[in-house]
Image (cartoon, rainbow, N blue to C red):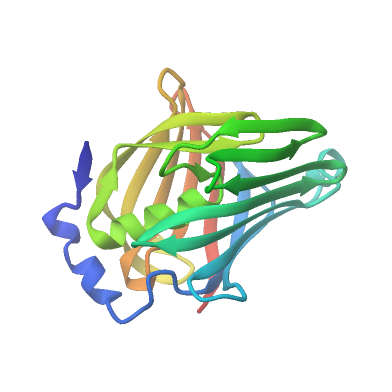
Amino acid sequence: MIASLSPAAGAGPAAAESEPLAAPFSAHYTADWRTLNVGTSDIALRTDTTPDHYVYTWTLTARGIFKIVYPNDVIQRSWFSVVNGHVRPDRYRSEQGDAKTSIDFDWPTGRVIGESEKKPVDLPLAPGSQDVMSIQIEVMLDLRSGKLPASFRILDKEGFKDFNYTLEGPARIRTALGMLDTLVVASQRPGNSRILRMWFAPSLGFVPVQAERSRDGKLEFAMRVKSLAK
């Protein structure tokens, strides 16, 4: 099942037509837990050493009292290629102090292999699978093409999980970059009350400018863009 972009958002892809499918960028965000500012977050998409290959990095840095609970930065990276307009992850790495995950996507053999926090990982790999980082770029490409699949199979440190994705529609929001027209995408595991919403800005190449995670309708965590470089 495919969710199509609404006519109100139709001008978005045209604004980004001159850019490559995955255009490098770096963005800086505030990170809030409920009503408290708890740190900063940075994401960066960079080209890798071969054509159509990229590295996507997310860093979360705690501040204040949260620095006691999270003394080490949370760092996640995904290496991926773009094949026929879609993201194909190659490697995923994460670390927070001594907690580390290292996973490789072996597409020729159809297996995901590696280690997650000292536990071995060896799982079957289905076409279209993503990791928790590469999925963000895949959604950006899907929004740009005008079609967003209704579900994705996503790998985190515990294994593969199925998530439903919903294009909730256009929204005009105030940001540190000014007023922006965005597309709101919600993701949720079936039967789970936690929902992640992300606001993607077509005029900025569909870079996410805001994210909110809620549970049972109550906001838990939010990221709001402060600066963007391309």
Q: Answer yes or no: is residue 172 visible.
A: no
Left or right position of 83 against 26: left
Q: Position of residue 19 (x, y in %)?
A: 36, 79
In this view, the residue farthest toward the front is 109
Left or right position of 172 against 177: left
Q: Position of residue 144 (x, y in %)?
A: 29, 62
Figure quadrant of the N terminus: top left
Q: Position of residue 54 (x, y in %)?
A: 55, 67
Left or right position of 77 against 136: right
Residue name at image x 53 percent, y 53 percent: 89
Measured along the vertical axis of the image, is residue 183 above or below residue 12? above
Residue 42 or residue 176, whichever sits in front:
42
Residue name at image x 45 percent, y 59 percent: 208
Residue 152 or residue 215, whichever sits in front:
152
Residue name at image x 77 percent, y 47 percent: 95
Q: Position of residue 187 (x, y in %)?
A: 41, 37
Q: Answer yes or no: is residue 66 visible.
A: yes
In this view, the residue farthest toward the bottom is 18
Question: For residue 179, which quarter of the picture?
Answer: bottom left
In this view, the residue farthest toward the top is 191
Left or right position of 211 against 26: left
